[in-house]
Image: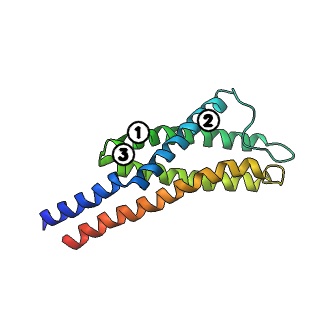
Amino acid sequence: MHAILKKTTNNILTHWFENLYIKILVLWYGLYQFIHIILNSAYLLGLTPWFPPAPVDGWTRQVLVFLSGMALFDLINAILTLVFVLGHLERKSWSIGLGLITLTVSFYAALIFTYGTMLNGAWTSNNLVGYLWFYIPFIPILLLFFILIIFVGKIVQTANITN
């Protein structure tokens, strides 16, 4: 049974690491997060004008603190994402777990960011295009997240069947 599990798991891993579409999605995620590193670092160092687009009345002090915390947390996740991408390109099995963690953090960060900015009235007609620049490039990352969840599910299912 152990040999069957190992062979099946190796087949699944081979598919994960060699699939061109998955590689493209992983590289896109790396590029997206590399840009996050630049933007979040510049913001946290005070080198950029305010980003994201503010509501008509501007951001309150409380929201600025919230968004600064999000930027720092997002920066840490973006750095870990680059480690995931490098691990994936080098076919390291540990990269799967790290990818699951960073994609989960990215997913929840997007939800929290969306909630915080919408709740504060930033999603006006004047700001809509600015916010679309956040979300349209994120769509392939959501796809990668769900593919990875399915992939991990296949490994778990294989382990349960052969045990």
Q: Is residue 94 above or below residue 152?
A: above
Location of mark 2 (residue): 40
Task: Give how far across and how far down residue 138 sits, in percent.
Answer: 58, 52
State which quarter of the image contains the C terminus.
bottom left
Could you say whether the residue bearing mark 3 is in a helix, strand or loop? helix
Q: Is residue 160 above or below residue 144?
A: below
At x 53%, y 57%, the residue is: 142
Amino acid type for the residue under numbered disc 3:
His
Q: Is residue 138 left or right of residue 66?
A: left
Location of mark 1 (residue): 83
Q: Which mark is residue 72?
A: none
Q: Nearer the viewer, mark 3 or mark 1?
A: 3
Amino acid type for the residue under numbered disc 2:
Asn
Mark 3 vs mark 1, CA separation in Å: 9 Å
Mark found first going from the N terminus, 3 or 1: 1
91 and 44: which one is in front?
91
Dot 2, how many residues are within 10 Å of its Cα: few (below 14), some (14-19), or many (20+)?
A: many
Could you say whether the residue bearing mark 1 is in a helix, strand or loop? helix
At x 65%, y 38%, the residue is: 68
At x 69%, y 39%, the residue is: 65
Q: Is residue 107 left or right of residue 58?
A: left
Mark found first going from the N terminus, 2 or 3: 2
Could you say whether the residue bearing mark 2 is in a helix, strand or loop? helix
Task: Give how far across and how far down residue 140 sits, in percent.
Answer: 54, 55
Location of mark 3 (residue): 88
Amino acid type for the residue under numbered disc 1:
Val
